[in-house]
Amino acid sequence: MMISIAKTCLRGIYSCHWNSDNTRQNRPCCWFSFLSFVSILALSWMYVCFIAFNDHTDVNDLAFKNLKTWVNWYMIVMVISAVLATYGLLLLVFGLLHFVIGEPLNLHWLHKVFLFLGLLTVTIGTVGVCIKWEKEWQTVYMSFQATAPFLHLCAVVALTLISWLVFKSYHKSQTAACKVFIMMTFMFVSAAVFLCPLAICSPCITNNLPPKPSLVGHRGAPMLAPENTMMSFRKSLECGVVAFETDVQLSKDMKPFLMHDSHENFLLRTTDVKKKFPGRDGDMHANFTLQELQTLNAGEWFLKTDPLQSVSSLSEEEKREAYNQTVPSLFELLLMAKKHNVSLIFDLKNENNSTGFHNSDSYYTTETIKNSGISPDKIWWLPKEYRHNVRNISPGFKQVYNGVAEMKADGGSFLNMNYNSLSAHNISELRKKNMSVNLWVVNERWLFSLLWCSGASSVTTNACHIFKNMSKPDWHLEPNKYMGIWISADVISLLLMFGQFLWQRKRNRVSRRNTKYERAERSPPA
């Protein structure tokens, strides 16, 4: 009774025929192959979305720049991808169960339509990444250093489970050629799965774990407070950051202030400029005095949009404080850094518009730094346009470089690069030469763990409150231990598959013997 109900449910979900239906569609195996292809593709796309989540604010910021409206587009993509992957995998499981119980693989036309839509969605997403977000493929490639050992174990488990169906097909095959093809294909796939750890190279499989990277607060602590506000930098101090990272622009009265967005509409995303200065929301930085900028509310947007899905973790008192934040000057941040003995690194957002050093953002920023009284060695000078001029008037600044070639040409020893711009080997080699390597922007635990194992000296992050509590990487294995796990998993899988093969062979012989006896009993006596 229960078996009959289970068959009915499976048939109803897969083919939408709740009653027994012996009719067969054209090319059912082709449709099952298509289902398998789309399911694996959707799962792979979900993996890409999960890995790229570290940089999801890039997508939302780009959308805001074009649409002038804040929507968490990346989360919408994640939800659609998760639904698509779940749907495809469940349908694939139902198809396999159909095969096991001997039901016809009659995939309903509605499922076919959904699968084509799913394929179209994944294709559009992949093309979009290739066109607008190409650097993210390097992140996906890099992620395998963290996930490959676990993906290998998952592949071994999947292979062991699927072997039951493979051996069943092998024993039911009527021709020797078909049996050879099935077994050779399966052996080739098995060998690839079992031996793939030979190609896995992860910095987290090592006997010598480097020291934990120091933390640099990216625009402060933007998960705990509105970015580039004094509250945000104060929150980052609670995380034990060694440096503040921020963005500097000059006001109309040539005073440096903190704001990431630049050019037209630079105040639109993070302030109430539309309310305070109607008709001026498209103005440039040079159209506002510092006094005007500091009348703007720079915290309300954070509570309304919840850009990093973190507002719910704040207390009511913290929310009230966040609401009352304003646009800070660079001088205010320098005083805070001086008081707490913290370093400062920044971008000059409009330096390329300067006409000579004494009219440049570099000049006015340097003068502000000197007037603050902060120790020169606490300034990590990153802007390259007037680097030599700045070095002449402030030789104590630590010079930081965006590229290895530029650093070597200038005789420097401090590198600041995107986290996916350097391989683990490159990082290790630079650290051996006693060079500092700061990588940005690192927000996910798996990525922080990987860069920890790689030997990065510091990382710029939005998630300092998460990383400060990590006493070790999420995973780290000595090579001998990993080899033991790898060999044990492969041996156990081989033994289980061998047992399944023998059991299937015995069962097939018994079935054939019973069939032979039934035919003999039915045949009339001579």
Image: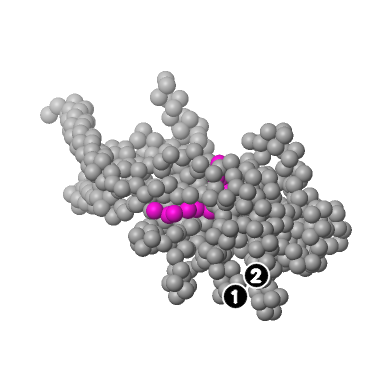
The quarter of the rendered structure image containing the N terminus is top left
Extent of the magenta region: 455-465
Q: Position of residue 419 (x, y in %)?
A: 48, 58
The type of residue carrying mark 2 is Ser
Residues tagged 1 and 2 counted as in contact (Cβ below 8 A) = yes
Instruction: In this rendered view, identify the residue nearer to me: 389 or 405.
Output: 389
SS label for mark 2: helix
Q: Residues within 10 Å of mark 2 (few under 14, many from 20)?
A: many
Q: Is residue 159 left or right of residue 8?
A: left
Residue on which the image places disc 1: 389
The residue at the far bottom in this view is 356
Please identify, in this view, whether the residue under mark 1 or under mark 2 is nearer the observer. Answer: 1
Q: Which residue does the numbered mark 2 point to in the structure image?
A: 362
Q: Quadrant of residue 104?
A: top left
Q: In this view of the protein, which residue sits in the foreground, 134 or 204?
A: 204
Q: Residues within 10 Å of mark 1 (few under 14, many from 20)?
A: some
In this rendering, would 11 be left or right of 368? left
- The part of the image, by quadrant, that contains residue 324 is top right
